[in-house]
Amino acid sequence: MRVLLTLVLFISSVLIPTSLCVSFSYNQQNLWTGVCNAGNTGRQSPINIVLADVVQSPSLTPLVFNSEWDSTNTVGTFSNTGHNIQYDLNSTSPDITTVTPIGTYKFLQFHMHWGNQTGVGSEHLINGEQSEVEIHFVHQKVGASTAGNMFGVVGVFADVGDIPMTGIWQQLNASNVPAVDDVILSDGIRFTDLLPSNRDYYYYEGGLTTPPCTEAVQFFLLKNRITVPSAYLARLRSIDQNDGPGAINYRDIQSLNGRVVMGSGSNMVYASCISVLLFAVLSLQLVFFV
Ligand SMILES: *[C@@H]1O[C@H](CO)[C@@H](O)[C@H](O)[C@H]1NC(C)=O
Ligand SMILES: *[C@@H]1O[C@H](CO)[C@@H](O)[C@H](O)[C@H]1NC(C)=O
Ligand SMILES: *[C@@H]1O[C@H](CO)[C@@H](O)[C@H](O)[C@H]1NC(C)=O
Ligand SMILES: [Zn+2]
């Protein structure tokens, strides 16, 4: 037990710094293969989620977001990492936690993935299609006992829309860090403003989507999307990154390798198929027995 704990502590202490120190370019993802294949057991991310293959599971209970998700007591910093604008929660901030069917996770940071033109941006695809933005709320599992479930990511997809850049978007716009390595202190972000009201999700086991691509992430991708104002999307695209302004920061799709994506909540397509089937069976019985 103690050996295991030491191992976990060791792994977690090397994992986070390493992921920050590996230099990489989104324009040359072929060069990632060396470092990313080192620990590749076939659960890389992101993936294309084919809705017809999603297995609805009653064991996937709703995610429980603690009250700090909905408060403005939060304190954190935005930094331009050269690949992203990343918000890190300060240690002085109240804990933000998310309870999932496989354990409790503590929020560490969030960042976004976007593209350089219409129709690209998100890392995960739904039925082969990208949305314009994918927000990743990165968490660390409380008491994680194996390296494979060290992190949990709640993902939110956003489609672009002609809505005003007010509220949370204005706050984020004010916190966009112009130059690589710059840091801006920011408080009062209410994270529920970045969540859709219905939080049904897809769940699968994957890995970090940046080198070293460590296979230690449980993904909870919300089915329902939010809308990102076109002015904020334009602002994201103007941010100076290592690959220059207008660069993309999403990774190519990885093989599913037999993994099953599960779904929580309702699945309207699936439900209506069943009722059509039931109706057909009932009609047949009527034909036979009436
Ligand atoms: C947030 O953290 C930074 C560095 O970790 C620290 O300098 C700053 O004082 C903290 N801010 C607050 C309001 O606690
Ligand atoms: C976006 O990037 C792709 C390459 O990743 C390039 O082919 C395309 O021309 C770019 N689009 C714009 C609008 O710059
Ligand atoms: C967004 O930020 C830019 C740069 O700081 C600023 O010029 C612009 O007025 C901001 N827009 C809104 C709606 O706050
Ligand atoms: Zn991410």
Image (spheres, rainbow, N blue to C red):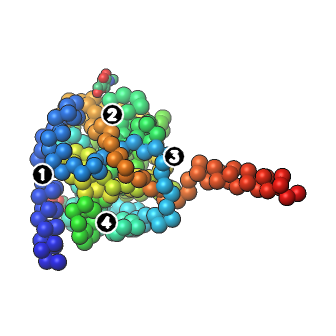
The mark closer to the camera, 1 or 3, is 3
Can you tell which mark lies on residue 184?
A: none
The residue tagged 3 is 52
Of the four image quadrants, the one with ligand 1 is: bottom left
Between discs 3 and 4, the one toward the N terminus: 3
Badge 4 density bin: few <14, some 14–19, many ≥20, Cα 10 Å: many
Name the residue tied to disc 1. Answer: 18
Using residue 21 as the reference point, say whether residue 201 is left or right of it: right
Q: Quadrant of residue 71?
A: bottom left
At x 23% / y 66%, what residue is drawn? 146
The image quadrant that residue 113 belongs to is top left
The residue nearer to you, when weighing 223 against 218, is 218
Question: Which mark identifies residue 115?
Answer: 2
Q: CA distance from mark 4 to mark 2?
A: 29 Å
The disc, 2 or 1, on the residue closer to the chain's N-terminal end is 1
Amino acid carrying mark 3 in the image: Ala
289 vs 5, left or right, is right
Give how far across and how far down residue 166 sits, in percent: 42, 44
Give the SS element for disc 2.
Answer: loop
Q: Does label 1 or label 3 sit earlier along the sequence?
A: 1
Instruction: For marks 4 and 1, give the CA distance.
Output: 21 Å
Q: CA distance from mark 3 to mark 4?
A: 29 Å
Helix, strand or loop at disc 4? Answer: strand
Give the amino acid at mark 2: Gly
Q: Which circle's residue, 4 or 1, is located before the other in the chain?
A: 1
Query: For the residue marked with disc 1, what is the amino acid?
Result: Thr
